[in-house]
Image (spheres, rainbow, N blue to C red):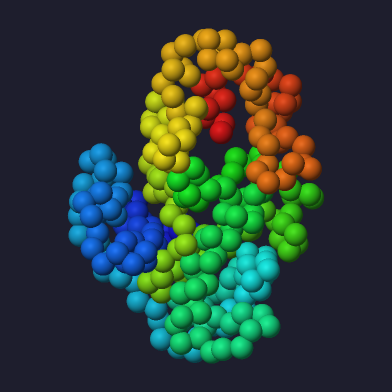
Amino acid sequence: LQTLFDSHDPRERLALALDCLPSSADTGNADMDEDDEDEAGGFFGSGLFPRRPRPPARRVRQGGPVELEVDRSCILGSVAPQVLSMSRAQLLRPVRVSYTGERGQDAGGLTRDFFSSFATAIGDCEPLLWEPTGRGSLQPVPASVAAAAPRGRHPCGLKMPDMYRACGRVFGLAVLHGCKLGRRLSRPFVRLLIGDELEDVESLQNELRHEAAEGAPDFRASPELLRRPLEELGLGGGALSFAWQVRGRPELPEVPLLEGGSRIPVNDENKAAWLRLL
């Protein structure tokens, strides 16, 4: 989003990001309740970003549509080379989507389906790039995890940073075409996109609590983690380390969050640093 909309101020980028988020209308609810309205309008719900009119919608420039062929078996791998090869002018033109091996012409439905399926697919099938939070939002994995991909490349052959650039372009295209993503972007990730980085560990824990699944609290978000010794919480004696296990890929070794991280146990002195790296 920052690459595609680098001329916009942070609050405008936030509004653009919000335009991608699923709404109550997507789930068949005609009316949005107060909580949903607060989530969509204020996003953080805490007064951090006051309500303000959204900027005018960006218009897709007229011209011949850009063809985008999507392979459902590898959505990101099939789309990334195509969107990365597009010029800025092409990114602002209408998109016409077709699916490999499927018949049918895109009158708008295939485009909407693609943007919805894209965010769902990368959350489910790209564990070296993305992971869903407990509440189902989408966020990048730690940088060291993406860097641990074989030869530093995605199976489609592109480098991992390029895959993130491709995802950013697809998110931007969704905004331009007025389409919803199939997953929300996680709140801490959106804060990074707009340049509002978390300043302290307590703020990070607040975001972890927000993204936790209902009825399944995230132990990392507990204030007790910072206040009490790890031994009292049953997390001492090397129960935690500075390493990351790739979700859904048990055959892969743990990825160190810093050099030698697999051999560094989390203790009361370094647990705050461990939280920041996660």
- The residue under the point 48% across, 67% down is 116
Mark count:
0
Residue at 57% across / 54% down in the picture? 123
- Residue at image location 72% in from the left, 45% down from the top: 249
Where is residue 21, by image quadrant?
bottom left
Q: Nearer the viewer, residue 4 or 126?
A: 126
Pick whichever, 58 or 266, lies toward us: 266
Quadrant for residue 126, please give it.
bottom right
The location of residue 79, given as percent across then percent down, is 62, 70
Left or right of 32, for residue 239 = right
Does 270 appear above or below 153? Answer: above
Residue 94 lies left or right of residue 47; in this view the side is: right
Depth order, front residue of 23/51 = 23
Whether 106 is drawn above or below 171: the answer is: below
Could you say where residue 192 lies in the image, as x and y percent from the top left?
A: 44, 44
Q: Quadrant of the N terminus?
A: bottom left
Tell me if residue 231 can be seen: yes
Q: Is residue 24 left or right of residue 186?
A: left
Q: Is residue 161 visible?
A: no
Q: Quadrant of the C terminus?
A: top right
| Residue 150, position as x, y percentages in the image | 78, 49
Image point (44%, 68%), residue name = 174
The image shows residue 48 at horizontal and vertical percentages of 26, 40
